[in-house]
Image: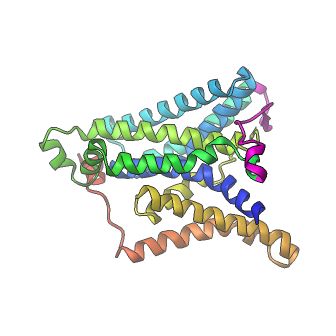
């Protein structure tokens, strides 16, 4: 049983962090399809930072800086250049996937996986069998609660919700929706960096091309499934992780009796089901008012 829980936490923790980035962007009225690109950027920057500097702290700072810069670039494209946020987000994902591959190729002269000498700090023997998990697993519920407080119990969160739901009304009372979106995307960039770092250095200590394997899009689906609520979206992300862990367990139990590709595809099937169920429960897909502003203004 402990092995299953550890597997769920290992695969679910990076997803939860990136989901929180999608939640705060959604609250600001931005449909953030660039999560995949920022996540792999954070993963690559963390491993390269550890490999080249020998410092986890410095590697995390580099990863956060890279993801924040990517978030600012995304904001500039959709706000100043008036690009469609959906297309801009997909472009950011392509930039992250291609840029990390180019970075590894430029530094090492090969496209092979990069191994770091060590990863993120572990919980240690005091936590028993869970001691193999990184400290970010323990901090994950703290960050979820902090995001809930930020969005639901602070003036910043109320202003952000106003900008996402009624940007024209927010502007009429002196709130700058563009500045609020920038702040939301930058905070999201920090969470994407942490999610990427946890994915690459939490247990694997390795970076490989396309290692996110669509997790950024799964995080976006978790945002929709969880109605852009920090706690609901976090549970949705963990639900996808549970399905993935069941698929891995099924491979060990059933072996070749069940198609291998089907078991690997279970998390993505659950993602599609989650989006469909969320849409049905809420009576259809409703576009945020600020998305219309970003599209037409």
x then y, percent, for residue 174: 15, 38
x then y, percent, for residue 271: 56, 66
The residue positioned 23% from the left and 45% from the top of the image is: 297
Q: Is residue 86 magenta?
A: no
Quadrant showing the N terminus: bottom right
Q: Does the magenta stretch include residue 125?
A: yes
Report whether residue 84 is seen: no
x then y, percent, for residue 80: 31, 34
Work out whether 97 lies above or below 266: above
Read off the magenta span: 108-129
Going by the image, does 59 lie left or right of 273?
right
The majority secondary structure of the magenta stretch comes to: loop
Q: Which colour scheme is used?
A: rainbow
Name the foreground residue: 172 vs 208: 172
Name the foreground residue: 103 vs 271: 271
Going by the image, does 196 lie left or right of 147?
right
The residue positioned 40% from the left and 48% from the top of the image is: 24
Labels in figure, total: 0
x then y, percent, for residue 268: 62, 65
The residue positioned 56% from the left and 38% from the top of the image is: 193
């Amino acid at each position: 049983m402990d092995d299953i829980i550890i597997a769920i936490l290992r695969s679910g923790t990076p997803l939860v962090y990136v989901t929180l980035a999608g939640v705060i962007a959604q609250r600001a009225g931005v449909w953030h399809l660039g999560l995949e690109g920022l996540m792999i950027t954070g993963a690559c920057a963390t491993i390269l930072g550890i490999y080249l500097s020998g410092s986890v702290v410095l590697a995390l700072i580099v990863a956060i800086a890279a993801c924040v810069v990517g978030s600012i670039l995304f904001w500039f494209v959709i706000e100043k250049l008036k690009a469609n946020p959906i297309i801009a987000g997909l472009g950011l994902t392509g930039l992250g996937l291609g840029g990390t591959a180019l970075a590894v190729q430029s530094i090492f002269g090969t496209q092979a996986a990069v191994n770091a000498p060590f990863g993120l700090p572990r919980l240690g023997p005091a936590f028993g069998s869970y001691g193999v998990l990184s400290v970010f697993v323990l901090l994950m519920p703290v960050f979820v609660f902090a995001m809930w407080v930020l969005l639901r119990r602070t003036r910043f969160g109320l202003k952000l919700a106003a900008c996402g739901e009624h940007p024209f009304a927010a502007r009429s009372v002196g709130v700058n929706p563009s500045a609020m979106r920038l702040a939301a995307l930058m905070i999201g960039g920090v969470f994407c960096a942490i999610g990427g770092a946890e994915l690459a250095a939490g247990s694997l200590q390795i970076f490989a091309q396309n290692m996110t394997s669509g997790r950024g899009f799964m995080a976006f689906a978790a945002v929709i499934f969880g109605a852009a609520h920090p706690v609901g979206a976090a549970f949705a992300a963990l639900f996808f992780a549970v399905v993935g862990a069941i698929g891995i367990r099924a491979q060990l139990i059933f072996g070749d009796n069940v198609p291998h590709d089907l078991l690997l595809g279970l998390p993505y099937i659950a993602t599609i089901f989650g989006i469909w169920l969320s849409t049905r429960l809420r009576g259809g897909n409703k576009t945020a008012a600020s998305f219309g502003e970003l599209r037409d203004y």
